[in-house]
DNA sequence: TCTGTTTGGTCAGCATTGTTGACGCATCCT
DNA sequence: AGGATGCGTCAACAATGCTGACCAAACAGA
């Protein structure tokens, strides 16, 4: 049933080996490996964010709030512009989640010292406490995966994830890591 | 700043060394490693989906449509119920993207043979062609990351991603892999 | 066969989070 | 002094989740 291979007609760059069977097997393995990557990223990312999502829902917040808490916590004193660049969203989208977080006392603003137009963002104690709670939730989840997989696998995971990032994101990540280890 | 170690109390299996400084350093590494995991997953997943998102936008479709194309392609003849379980959304949410896709000729329905209530979903040629285009986009991206990282890292990546999945998702993944290799 | 359950579709309304476009204000820089 | 920059905000819209309610067709067991 449903064995029509119509999609295969568009198969790209199939190596024209003398042994068609071997070529097909190779391609099949390749394809199934990459299909697996799609599945893993979908399920893995979904379940990675599930814990925080549940906690946040009780506070009438969403994943966007978590991202703000995370990246402001990661780079205290970050400017609004830099946060926008990291998140890759518009200032209107950010404003909608950031303003309530400031009003509710999770985030504070401070005018920049050299450039007074800038609003330097930091977490309040309340914000830091919530962020830590969310962090611990994901930490436990990731630790479980890390322990199950072993240190070598963790290193491989990091290498691949770095590769999945675009050029711009690699720059952001570098800056984050520098900021986190002063 | 933010050096309060409240969360550290719950840190699992922290080696109790006689030198607290060494312990703290170890813990600090642990935390920065896990912070890194959060960053990697955010940036990596975002950029992993960026290519398809751009293609889909031109067809007035979104990521939800891609998921349907992907999982129906992965398990041709899947029931609506099974698709709902895999996606983890409500039938109303699915219906909103699925019905237009049927009307536009990307997906076909067929009544189940044993159980005529079931609507077995498959991709049309048009749907398979689009799915393949999206697949190739992500394939190229993932291949780049895989090549840069090396085969050993890829194995580690897979192990960790599997660990990041919940029990239910692992079951779904198994079923998908079985269906893909008959 | 009658009845209750299951599978799937649909309507209505709502929340979150993203988008454009258009302004306005304070501040910086030339 | 005047243009560029950083930030905030109003309005409208789109995609994708959610709940609740209700209906029809088909199955399954008494």
Image: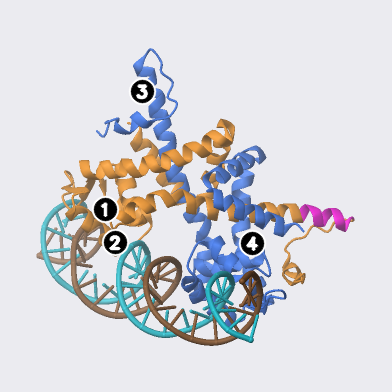
Chain colours: A orange, B blue, C cyan, D brown
Q: Name the residue under label 4.
A: B136
C-alpha distance separating marks 2 and 1: 8 Å
* Contact, mark 4 vs mark 2 (Cβ under 8 Å): no
Task: Work out which quarter of the rendered image holds the C terminus of chain B and state it.
Answer: bottom right
Left or right position of A13 against A49: right
* Contact, mark 2 vs mark 1 (Cβ under 8 Å): yes
* Contact, mark 1 vs mark 4 (Cβ under 8 Å): no
Task: Work out which quarter of the rendered image holds the N terminus of chain B and state it.
Answer: top left
Tag of residue B24: 3
Q: What stretch is highlighted in magenta?
A: A19-27
Chain to which the residue tagged by mark 2 belongs? A
C-alpha distance separating marks 1 and 3: 32 Å
Q: Residue furthest right?
A: A18
Does the magenta portion include A154? no
SS for callout 1? helix
Q: Mark 1 points at which residue?
A: A80
Which x, y percent locates residue B75? 67, 64
When the figure is inspected, residue B11 is found, relative to residue B119, above or below; the finding is above
Please identify the quarter of the rendering in which residue B77 is found. Answer: bottom right
Which x, y percent locates residue A94? 29, 59
C-alpha distance separating marks 4 and 3: 46 Å
């Amino acid at each position: 049933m449903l064995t029509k291979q119509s999609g295969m007609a568009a198969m790209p760059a199939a190596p024209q080996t003398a042994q068609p069977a071997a070529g097909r097997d190779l391609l099949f393995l390749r394809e199934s490996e990459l299909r697996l990557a799609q599945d893993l990223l979908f399920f893995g990312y979904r379940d990675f964010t599930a814990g925080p999502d549940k906690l946040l829902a009780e506070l009438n917040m969403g994943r966007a709030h978590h991202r703000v808490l995370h990246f402001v916590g990661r780079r205290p004193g970050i400017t609004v512009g830099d946060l926008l660049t990291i998140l890759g969203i518009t200032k209107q989208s950010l404003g909608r989640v950031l303003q309530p977080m400031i009003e509710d006392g999770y985030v504070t603003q401070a005018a920049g010292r050299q450039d007074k137009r800038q609003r330097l963002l930091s977490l309040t104690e309340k914000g830091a406490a919530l962020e830590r709670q969310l962090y611990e939730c994901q930490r436990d989840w990731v630790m479980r995966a890390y322990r199950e997989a072993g240190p070598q696998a963790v290193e491989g995971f990091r290498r691949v994830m770095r590769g999945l990032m675009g050029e711009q994101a690699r720059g952001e990540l570098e800056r984050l890591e520098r900021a986190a280890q002063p």
